[in-house]
Image (cartoon, rainbow, N blue to C red):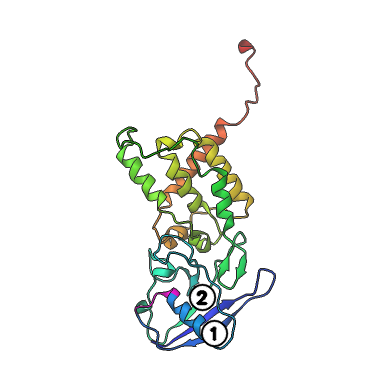
Amino acid sequence: MDLTLHVWRQAGAATAGRFVRYELGDVSPDMSFLEVLDLLNQQLIGRREEPVAFDHDCREGICGACGMVINGRPHGPRAATTACQLHMRHFPEGAEIWVEPWRARAFPVVKDLVVDRSAFDRIIQAGGFITARAGSAPEANAIPVPKGDADRAMDAAACIGCGACVAACPNASAMLFVAAKVSHLGLLPQGQPERAQRVLRMVEVMEAEGFGACSNHGECMAACPKEISIDFIARLNRDYLTSVFRHQPSEEGPDPAEG
């Protein structure tokens, strides 16, 4: 295959970026998109030019590191597919492909296609954990969990934290990511002690990081490589409002009869 790549090149967050055109030949249809970038970088290094910076790790669709926008869509044109699992056979011969980083204020560009997604880490640190001692693996039936709750918790736990939901949202909202993390723990018995504080803290940090508000466009679900449902956002909203009302101080003050 012969391809034309238009790749976003940017030296850093403080510098302006631009698309640079590259011609590639002898691309195998069985190559993944990241392997095409590897091929491009080999040629750039051979010409003593600066290679394209991009994130990658497992290349198996489970780490979430390979985030990039391909032809205007996070992770590319294939549904439920990460960029590392996107193969060139899904593009026509002679295709022109535009590659750029996530576009969100909360994800500043580090270099080229690499963005700083540490905002997600800070949201997780705010409440995405349980204090219950896990220890060794418990006996499977020691804590009964309804089948429906277990299935929904597993669906939420499928989130790989790639940020495609943010990149796809016109408001750059992180609600689907936060909803998945809140719901994963909130549906299980081990997550109940911190359930109210968890949602309050994680939403507070999400807003402080500069992510936009959710306006129910649904683009986040369409772009999610793990097909996480926006139903989890509704669940997050219910948990959040319940927690806000429970933690509001009473305007009437303490009951004198209780004193």
Q: Residues within 10 Å of mark 1 (few under 14, many from 20)?
A: some
Question: Mark 2 is on which residue type?
Answer: Val
- For the record, the magenta segment spans 30-34
Residue at left 37%, top 75%? 87
Residue with the mark numbered 1: 44
**Is 120 placed above or below 194 here?**
below
Ranked by sequence position, the earlier of labels 2 and 1 is: 1
Which element is circle 1 on?
Answer: helix
Image quadrant containing the N terminus: bottom left
User: For residue 226, which quarter of the picture?
Assistant: bottom left
Task: Give residue 209's position: percent from left, percent from top.
Answer: 62, 53
Q: CA distance from mark 2 to mark 1?
A: 17 Å
Image coords of residue 82 (percent x, y):
42, 66
Picture layout, residue 207 above or below residue 85: above
Instruction: Give the residue number, with chain letter if any, for mark 2.
Output: 99
Q: Amino acid at mark 1?
A: Leu
Q: Residue at x 32, y 41 (%)?
A: 148
Residue 115 location in percent, x, y? 58, 65
